[in-house]
Amino acid sequence: GKGVLRHIIGRIGQSGWMIILVTATEQLPHKEKWVEKLTERVPQVETIVHNVNGKRTNVILGPKNNILYGDGTITDHIKDLRFTLSPYSFFQVNPEQTTVLYDQALTYADLKGDETVIDAYCGTGTISLFLAHKAKHVIGIEIVEPAIINARENAKRNGYDNTEFIVADAAVEMPKLYKSGVRPDVIVFDPIRAGCKEEVLTSAAGMEPKRIVYVSCNPATMARDIEILTHYGYELQKVQPVDMFPMTAHVETVCLLSRKDK
């Protein structure tokens, strides 16, 4: 095609709306008019971002952002925790059920206050901060750098100094942590629909955490990954589905695995 505008994305947070205009070219014609009309007709708009994605793939967002209005972020919350979100930030869209989901993950983690926890796909630090409330130290890993920047800001904003956030592919960082002697008490997985790469799972099993909490949006890849973990000495203890999208076939699931010899 020959058009310029590829997508218009709206994100709604507690503080207001974020509008993302995704174009195929570096230029957004009449950008001042876009800002004027959007803010006039939608007063809830807090920020407007122009995103450039010239690649012909099914990936919606490109690597470059130009902030047209506001500061490029919005704020949302889960329970008492407040989170800064950028265009690249993943954040669950059903806040009521997200609380149920994360509370269940925290229950399965069974933290007493002296544990080290790895959150291997931490995003903006949502689950990490739930864990940080009960853990001694939380290590979050995320490949998307803007999400890690948000995670560090979110930890500071919520008053947590017992977190460490690393920009890295979990498939690279988990073997590195294993080889360096890091031995967490609990590991949490909340991967994308494709699930975990085998290097992540084998490294996690080698660290011998007492418990692994697996949060998944895809039962098929979750079952595949759990089968691998059982091969390395873990046993599935509990499974709790959470209906994040009522009236659809989609389901989030929280699983608890523990070492067979513990």
Image (tube, rainbow, N blue to C red):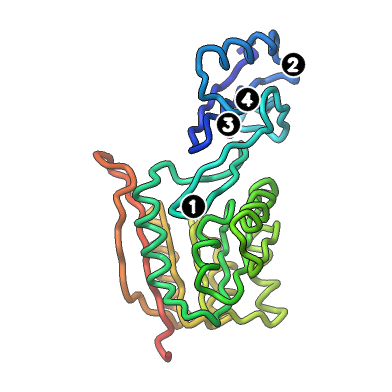
Residue 48 is labelled as 4
Let me know if residue 76 appears in the view: yes
- Identify the element where label 4 is drawn: strand
Structural distance between the alpha carbons of marks 1 and 3:
17 Å
Which of pointers 4 and 3 lies earlier in the amino acid sequence?
Answer: 4
Amino acid at the residue labelled 2: Gln
- Identify the element where label 3 is drawn: loop
Q: Position of residue 64 (x, y in %)?
A: 73, 32
Q: Position of residue 86 (x, y in %)?
A: 62, 39
Q: Quadrant of the N terminus?
A: top right
Label 3 crowd (10 A; few <14 / some 14-19 / many >=20): some
> Are the residues at dot 4 and dot 3 in contact (C-beta closer than 8 Å)?
no
Residue 194 is labelled as 1
Eye-nearest disc, 4 or 1? 4
Q: Does residue 145 appear left or right of residue 230 in this picture? A: right
Which of pointers 1 and 2 lies earlier in the amino acid sequence?
Answer: 2
Q: Which residue is mark 2?
A: 27
Q: Does residue 60 appear left or right of residue 257 in this picture? A: right
Eye-nearest disc, 1 or 3? 3
- Identify the element where label 2 is drawn: loop
